[in-house]
């Protein structure tokens, strides 16, 4: 028989997997990609500063400062089929936006499509993509 503790551990793992994907539209706001991500995790996923810091491989104080700077800003998230695993952002080699653009490029989206999803200029997306490729 399966013990209650084993069931609880499996449920915790399942919850983490479900929570591990971030909708791409989080990054289509006026906030910086980092600010948008922190605000989403804090307000929509009810994560603690320490949990956000651990997931993003950042200092907890940085997360706290970032959130307190933008906590009064509005973050609207629209439905999308595109998500990105939160684990992607723990790799600090690329910026958050570079990770997002690289992820969408791997899904065979064009620069124009990505610019529309992220509400950014196509030239910005092209520049971010170029920088990400150069760093990889």
Image (tube, rainbow, N blue to C red):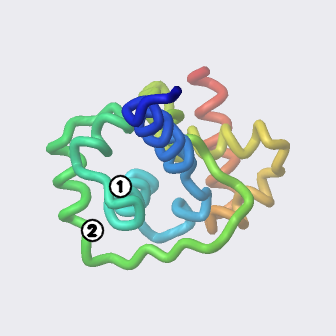
Q: How far is the residue under mark 1 from the one under mark 2?
A: 10 Å
In the visual, does 48 lie left or right of 5?
A: left
Residue drawn at point x = 45 percent, y = 54 percent: 33
- Quarter of the image where one finds residue 24: bottom right
Query: Is mark 1 in CB contact (under 8 Å) with mark 2?
Result: yes
Residue 104: image location, x then y, percent: 72, 45
Q: Image point 18% across, 63% down: which residue?
A: 68
* Outermost residue, front side: 1
The answer to which of 86 and 4 lies nearer the viewer is: 4
In the rendered image, which residue does mark 2 sit on? 70
In this view, the mark in front (1 or 2): 1
Q: Are there few (<14), some (14-19), or many (20+) residues within 10 Å of tag 2?
A: some
In terms of depth relative to the viewer, which is nearer, 83 or 28?
83
Mark 1 residue element: helix
Q: Residue at x 61, y 21 (%)?
A: 136
User: Mark 1, residues whose alpha carbon is within 10 Å: few (<14), some, or many (≥20)?
Assistant: many
Q: Is residue 129 above or below residue 40?
A: above
Residue 18 in the image: above or below residue 45 = above
Going from N to C along the chain, the mark reached first, 1 or 2, is 1
Where does residue 60 sit, x and y in percent of width and height? 19, 41
- Find the residue positioned furthest to the top: 136
The residue depicted at 53 percent of the width and 34 percent of the height is: 88
Return the residue at label 1.
38
Q: Describe the element under mark 2 as helix, strand or loop.
A: helix
Residue 2 x %, y %: 50, 29
Note whether 13 is above or below 35 in the view shown: above
Q: Is residue 62 left or right of residue 40?
A: left
Nearest the viewer among 97 and 128 is: 97
Image coordinates for residue 111, horizontal then vertical, percent: 77, 52
């Amino acid at each position: 028989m399966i013990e209650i503790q084993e069931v609880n551990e499996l449920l915790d793992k399942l919850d983490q997997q479900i929570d591990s994907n971030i909708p791409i539209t989080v990054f289509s706001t006026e906030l910086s990609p980092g600010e948008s991500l922190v605000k989403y995790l804090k307000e929509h996923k009810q994560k603690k500063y320490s949990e956000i810091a651990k997931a993003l491989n950042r200092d907890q104080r940085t997360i706290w400062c970032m959130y307190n700077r933008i906590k009064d800003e509005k973050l609207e998230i629209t439905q999308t089929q595109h998500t990105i695993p939160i684990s992607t952002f723990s790799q600090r080699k690329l910026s958050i936006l570079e990770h997002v653009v690289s992820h969408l490029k791997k899904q065979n989206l064009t620069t124009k499509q990505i610019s529309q999803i992220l509400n950014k200029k196509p030239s910005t997306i092209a520049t971010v993509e170029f920088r990400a490729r150069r760093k990889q």
